[in-house]
Image: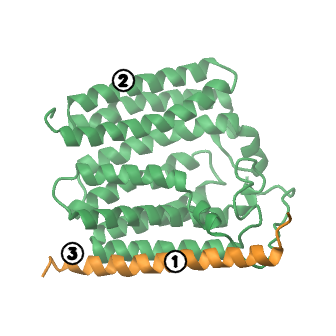
Amino acid sequence: MADDPADARMRTIRARNRALLLVLLGLVALFYVLTFVRMGGH
Amino acid sequence: MNELPTTAVAPRLDDGAGAAVGDYVQILKPRVMSLVVFTGVVGLALAPGHLHPFLAAVAILCIAVGAGASGAINMWYDRDIDRVMRRTAGRPLPAGRMAPGEALGFGCVLAVGSVALMGLAVNWVAAALLALTIAFYVFIYTMWLKRRTPQNIVIGGAAGAFPPLIGWAAVTGDLAWGAIALFAIIFFWTPPHFWALSLYKADEYAAAGIPMLPVVAGKCETKRQMLLYTLVLWPVTAAPWLLGIAGWRYAAGAGALSLLFTVSAIRVWRDDTDRNARQMFAFSLAYLALIFALLLADSGIGGGR
């Protein structure tokens, strides 16, 4: 069955948004842990 | 040599959705990134001193992202010649799956982000080296040397040789002869590695207007140069042992691998077909990975020193 171009377009955009969300959450977690490590656990 | 062929067809971006996640991953050149990360890890492991494991992981992440940023900006700049070569025509930009501005913006954001994170989280010496690596690859290799001289990958190879220095500097905050030795191994390995590839892709490089050595000086001279570089790698790969950062097990393994690499170059030199060049290209990847794996294993064993 042929893929609807509008559906394919939406899927691409949705996947990209999810990837961006994961990256942002990853950065939040990274800076959170980094702060503790750089402060030496105090 | 700067003139590009006119056969290139402008890509089309017609669905308006922009590039897919996979395309963003692809322009980071993940295969190149994996070798860069591995050599960076070895630099971290061999450096004297201690770095918190989390900060070490952040340093490796920054090296990986910085390498990916270089790859993305390289793909943005080289999108015209990538379209001409079969090996690269399927990349997101020449295939029309990604707009040039997307790749450039993505690469620049990652470059700035990786350098800033390295500086804030680890130290600014490692961050400066990472910035230098990205700038060297983008401005010196991609924009200046690649389309102008057959020595492009000789000088440009320095960009690929920086990661162990960055890893080392992440731990110590400075550089030492041991780090320079790791740099030298990759620097002298790069020419025979890329020339093996360019021997059997010479037609494509010529069509794209890239003055690789086989295109400019011929295959015979290229094979001679490749053999010379494999001989230079004997003392260069022995340097970590001579400097005391690796033990006799590493020295023995590196000697055996360098012997095989030289034998591979001799086979290429004596053979007019592409078969041996392809085998040498494949072996060159294994050679570098194994040399650095030996260094890593030796740093863990320790007792052989």
The one nearer the camera, B214 or B65, is: B65
Q: Name the element at disc 3.
A: helix
Query: Is residue B97 depicted above or below B277 in this figure?
Result: below
Q: CA distance from mark 3 to mark 2?
A: 42 Å
Q: Where B260 sits versus B174, above or below?
A: above
Q: Nearer the viewer, residue B49 or A4?
A: A4
Q: Which residue is mark 3?
A: A37
Label 1 and label 3: CA atoms lie apart by: 25 Å
Q: Chain of mark 1?
A: B
- Of the 4 image quadrants, the one containing the C terminus of chain B is top left
Q: Secondary structure at mark 2?
A: helix
Find numbered disc 1 in the image and state the secondary structure of the residue it sits on.
Answer: helix
In the drawing, what numbered circle is on residue B109?
A: 1
Q: Residues within 10 Å of mark 1 (few under 14, many from 20)?
A: few
* Residue that appears at 55% across and 74% down: A19
For the image, the number of numbered tags is 3
Which residue appears at 52% of the width and 77% of the height?
A: B109
Relative height, residue B266 to residue B53 (above, below): above
What is the chain letter for disc 3? A
Q: Which mark is residue B5?
A: none
Q: Colour of chain A?
A: orange
Q: Which chain is green?
A: B
